[in-house]
Amino acid sequence: MPGLLRDYFVVLPDSVAGHTVAGQLPAPEATGAGTAPTMTGAASAPTATGAVSAPTPTGATSAPTATGAGAGVGDVVTVPHPSGRPWVLARPLFRKVSHLRRGDDALVLIGPDRVPEAVLAGLLEGARDRAGLERRLARLPGLHHVVAYLSGETWIRGTASGLRRIYHARHPQAGTIASDRPAVLAHLTGAPLDDGALALRMLDFLPHPLSRRALWRGVHETGAGYGLALPVAAPGTAAAPGPHEYRWWEPPPPELPLAEGARRVGEAVAASVRAHVGGLDRISCELSGGLDSTALTFAARATGPAALSLLTVAARDRYSEDETWARKAVEEAHDPTDALAHHIIPADQAPYFYADLTATSAELNDEPLPVAPGRARAHLLLSRAHATGSRYHLTGYGGDELFLGLPHAYQDLFHGNPLTAWNHLSGLRHQLGWPLLPTLKALLNRSTFPQWLAGAVTTEPQPVTRTPLLSWGVRQSLRPWFTDHARTLITEEFRTAAERAEPIDRWRGRHVDIDAVRMGARHFQAMEDIGMTIGLPVAAPFYDDRVLEATLAVRLPERISPWRYKPLLVEAMRGVVPDALLARTTKDHMSSDEHQGLREHAPELADLWTGSRLAEHGLVDARHLLRLAAEPFSPVLVEHSISSTVAGETWLRTAENAWPTPQLTPTTTTVTTTSEALQ
């Protein structure tokens, strides 16, 4: 079946209708298995009545036990309401569900590691309200979805980095239901696709707040850094009040000197790596040779796995330096007592971009992602990692967004320290070739975020590389193959959003920094879903909230510099990564593989535009795209990237065929409850 959702959870109301909805959840096959998953009643319950009625997907082969330890890959874990009806229902393919109830209060954490009962108790006991619980949760790595019941209210949140997100929709009978997967809510509520949101995804990236536009009508995303509160119905009433969002996260002030900030970043990275792979015997890392992957490799090595496999994809470009640095890292890491293996994938075995486009039907991402054309390359690397026996794979995704530094930050510095800002900006200006007067004009520009957002898309050509980037983001041009209908939808979406838009932070640079991290975290979801297809969990520890917070807490002129490459990461990893490897100041790019992919896979692209679903929605001119497929080196494709349009087309085909069979009918099975926390 295409578009299988292998990992998700839902939060349901305490009602007969909510119980019924639980039985209508999609029941995809577990990776490598041929039967539907069974419901596992691994939950702590407040009653001792013995039996609780709980739904199971059609095809479940046996009644589950409630020990928690028996829950396996593909099992569905149910945490009940006090009534015994399903409250949180999760299918955590690789993630762990930890749960504890104390009196009327309850806490559920869904993340990479199992949280011990004693830790859960320390979090929950004494927390009088959301703020109190949030202060305690800050002790953990910031990688978990949180579902809690406090003071008569259920509330749910993801992560500030945007790696873990929350969606909600209104079911006609059950009321508000929430999930980490919008497609699940669309399936349960029968929501149709939203052409406006689909048109937006044909852009290379979506700035805040448009990135929150879910692809289905009536399905809403809760903003990163915000939680979703679900009040219960008042006594004697039939319906609960509607949900509301609340802000639980604020970025820290940039006050720390480099040395202290580096210490905190190093500790946060180490904790995040341990949360993912600590205690595992066989793990793997993508060692591209870049600074980010090298840092994660040595952090993973410090956890002491019995076997560590490092994978490097050789570059076709003879001027590439990545493989050289990767080999150097392996030499520096060599220890006769380590079971360390370095696997180099020859360049001629690495697929070009746009290879095997139809394979994206194996994963139903939350949205079209511009990284989709590179799926075959990612699939190859993860497959090789899985073949080594790895139980978890780490990547350096997120390092560029966190540590490279964007020029927009100098706008912030200019307000408090104009001489330092201009000194740094002058160094950057000369490196990038920015003309003096346009740079000054951009630096002194005082347009508001709504003003910028309203004009953030244009029919004009893309800005040239020598255009100063000091605003609230990057202005994008509409592609020549977009239809008039698509252009109208996109421009109206931006104008409508601008009418009520508020920036993530009042400072431009800080706003852009956080938005870039959240954008990267969304894109990383594609890697996670490929890993699920293969059977290998994949992680990007840099997207941990604690790493983000530690980074943002460092003073701007020390965190980024035109004269040092990623100074904060370098200092954070000093003593973990050998100094010889921290000296690298270059970064490779794969633009040639993308351009060559257009030529190598022109027939597949032509097939994609023949019977285009985007064209059926009136969003693209299929004839124009067919002409471009026949002219892969057209100047149009040099000026305009086609990757997001390809991603939209492949995603749409997957979404339309996600559940070709009728909805599952609700059934019940007996679940024995216990008073133990999920272990």
Image (tube, rainbow, N blue to C red):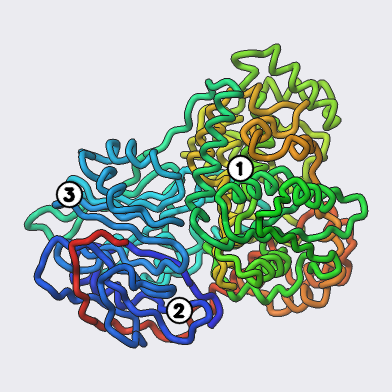
Give the Cα separation between the discs numbered 1 and 3. Answer: 36 Å
Q: Quadrant of the C terminus?
A: bottom left
Q: CA distance from mark 3 to mark 2?
A: 34 Å
The picture places residue 219, in percent across and down from the top left corner, at 42, 60
Disc assigned to residue 152: 3
Is the residue under label 1 in contact with that under label 2 (CB below 8 Å)? Answer: no
Q: Which residue in the structure is indicated by mark 1?
A: 516
- In the drawing, what numbered circle is on residue 28? 2
Q: Outermost residue toward the front?
A: 336
Disc 1 residue crowd, few under 14, some 14–19, many 20+, Cα 10 Å: many
Q: Quadrant of residue 108?
A: bottom left
Q: Position of residue 246 (x, y in %)?
A: 34, 41
* Residue type at numbered disc 3: Gly
Residue at 54% in and 75% down: 3
Out of 659 and 334, give the one closest to the viewer: 334
Tag 2 secondary structure? loop
Looking at the rendered structure, the kind of residue marked 2 is Pro
**Residue type for callout 1:** Ala
